[in-house]
């Protein structure tokens, strides 16, 4: 979704921080993080974040 910018509420719902640099596939192994990513507040309202982590999982072969 080009041009879409997640709101601060969305970032908080996904347990992310705008000031964090980079991502890691290690977070995909964390049940707490994955639980937050799958919450409706995050999963249904933050398409770029969900797409990003799905792409990371696919790249790692964890899809």
Image (spheres, helix red, strand yellow):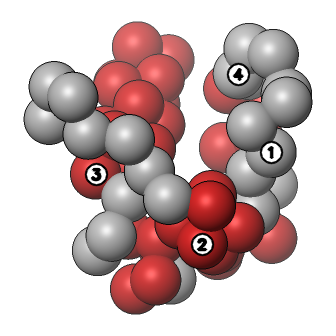
Marks 1/4: CA–CA distance = 11 Å
> 10 Å neighbourhood of mark 4: few (<14), some, or many (≥20)?
few
Marks 3/2: CA–CA distance = 14 Å
Residue lying at 37% horizontally and 58% vertically, measured from the top left: 46
Marks 3/4: CA–CA distance = 16 Å
Badge nearest the viewer, 3 or 2: 2
Looking at the image, residue 10 lies above or below residue 4? below
* Residue linked to disc 1: 17
Residue 23 shows which numbered tag?
4
Residue 9 shows which numbered tag?
2
Instruction: Answer with left or right where residue 21 lies relative to residue 47.
Output: right
Marks 2/1: CA–CA distance = 11 Å
Badge nearest the viewer, 3 or 4: 3
Q: Secondary structure at mark 4?
A: loop
Classify residue 8 by image quadrant: bottom right
Query: Residue 18 location in percent, x, y?
Result: 74, 37
Badge nearest the viewer, 1 or 4: 1
Q: State which tag comes first along the sequence, 2 or 1.
A: 2
* Residue linked to disc 3: 47
Q: State which tag comes first along the sequence, 1 or 4.
A: 1
Classify residue 35 by image quadrant: bottom right
In the rendered image, the residue lying farthest to the bottom is 40
Marks 1/3: CA–CA distance = 16 Å
Query: Residue 13 location in percent, x, y?
Result: 63, 74
Mark 1 and mark 4 residues within 8 Å of each other at the beta carbon: no
């Amino acid at each position: 979704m080009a041009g879409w910018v997640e709101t601060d509420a969305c970032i908080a719902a996904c347990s992310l921080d705008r000031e964090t640099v980079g991502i890691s596939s290690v977070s995909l192994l964390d049940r707490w993080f994955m639980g937050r990513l799958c919450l409706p507040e995050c999963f249904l309202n933050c398409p770029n974040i969900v797409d990003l982590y799905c792409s990371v999982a696919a790249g790692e072969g964890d899809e």
